[in-house]
Image (cartoon, rainbow, N blue to C red):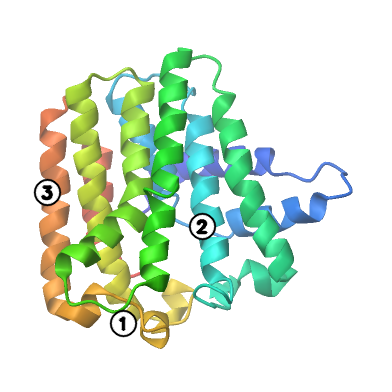
């Protein structure tokens, strides 16, 4: 998915993340080191890139959105650290390297995730160059989408609920555990830029549909992917007896649904004026990804 523009944007995000998470000679810096280990361990940076692109599309023209972009990536990384723990998915690898708990131990990994989640809101709150009403609203969006009625709720359904043959239940889980953070990216970008309610609603529709498509492709790759590209074990969902669309519908039907949701995401962009070239490119390439 890389071109020069996206490579530069990704590098800028990663430089900011490194600055925010660099050790400073404190007695407790090992937990910062563990957090930075996971944050800097590759990744497509899709969520912060989407946030910055929606901010730009809706009229933002400076660096004011980078704190929120980094905060969102910190929350995403915390979720991956905790996801990999033995009490959750029990995965030993993430992006081709030992998971945080394999590298630093379970206790330190747990604290690294806790620290990233908490620090994310401190970073977001330091967005001082934009109207405080927008900043407060975006902090609310981020908290709601990461919390009980968002990603955490989706993870509970994923780990605790019995297997189901109800597609609507499955898609609701995907919305909560995956779409809600992607919806944060699109709606926070638009809200920070001062977009009106109609545009924010279109951004939310985009994020919802892209998130469902993203999770469907993840399910497919967990069945058909290659460890050398994914950087994590194949078949972990089956091993953990997880509810997945592939298990319920099969690979080909999931591909059809992923294409349908991707088209819905692209359609949601139609009501937003401006140059959407990068967003369209990202959206299409996520559908075709093999990692």
Residue sitting at 20 percent across and 50 percent down?
A: 209
Q: Are marks 1 and 2 in contact (CB under 8 Å)?
A: no
User: Which residue has dot 2 on it?
Assistant: 79
The 10 Å Cα crowd at callout 3, few under 14, some 14 to 19, many 20 or more, is some
Residue sitting at 44 percent across and 47 percent down?
A: 146
Image quarter in which the C terminus is found: bottom left
Residue sitting at 39 percent across and 56 percent down?
A: 153
Distance from Cα at disc 1 to Cα at disc 3: 25 Å
Quarter of the image for residue 112 reads bottom right
Q: Is residue 215 above or below residue 166?
A: above
Q: Is residue 97 above or below residue 150?
A: below
User: Which residue has dot 3 on it?
Assistant: 264
The numbered mark, 1 or 3, whose residue comes first in the sequence reads: 1
Q: Secondary structure at mark 1?
A: helix
Distance from Cα at disc 3 to Cα at disc 2: 27 Å
User: Which residue has dot 1 on it?
Assistant: 223
Quarter of the image for residue 109 reads bottom right
Q: Position of residue 56 (x, y in %)?
A: 34, 26
Q: Are marks 3 and 2 in contact (CB under 8 Å)?
A: no
- Mark 3 vs mark 2: in front: 2
Taking 241 as reference, is 127 left or right? right
Q: Secondary structure at mark 2?
A: helix
């Amino acid at each position: 998915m890389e071109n020069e523009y996206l490579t530069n944007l990704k590098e800028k995000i990663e430089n900011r993340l490194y600055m925010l998470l660099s050790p400073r000679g404190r007695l407790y810096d090992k937990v910062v080191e563990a957090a930075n280990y996971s944050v800097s361990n590759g990744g497509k940076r899709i969520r912060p890139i989407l946030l910055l692109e929606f901010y730009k599309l809706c009229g933002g023209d400076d660096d004011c959105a980078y704190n929120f972009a980094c905060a969102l990536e910190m929350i995403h990384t915390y979720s991956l650290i905790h996801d990999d723990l033995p009490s959750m998915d029990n995965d030993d690898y993430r992006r081709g390297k030992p998971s945080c708990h394999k590298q630093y131990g379970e206790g330190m990994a747990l604290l690294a995730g806790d620290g990233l989640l908490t620090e994310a809101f401190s970073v977001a709150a330091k967005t001082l160059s934009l109207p405080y009403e927008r900043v407060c609203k975006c902090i609310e969006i981020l908290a709601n989408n990461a919390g009980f009625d968002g990603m955490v709720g989706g993870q509970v359904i994923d780990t605790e609920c019995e297997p189901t043959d109800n597609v609507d239940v499955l898609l609701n889980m995907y919305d909560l555990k995956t779409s809600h953070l992607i919806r944060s990216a699109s709606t926070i970008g638009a809200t920070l830029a001062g977009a009106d309610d109609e545009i924010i609603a279109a951004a939310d529709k985009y994020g919802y549909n892209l998130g469902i498509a993203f999770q469907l492709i993840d399910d497919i790759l967990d069945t058909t992917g290659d460890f050398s590209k994914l950087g994590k074990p194949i078949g972990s969902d089956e091993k953990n007896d997880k509810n997945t669309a592939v298990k319920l519908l099969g690979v080909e039907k999931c591909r059809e649904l992923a294409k349908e949701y991707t088209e819905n995401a692209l359609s949601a962009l139609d009501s937003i004026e401006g140059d959407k070239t990068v967003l369209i490119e990202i959206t299409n390439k996520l559908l075709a990804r093999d990692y």
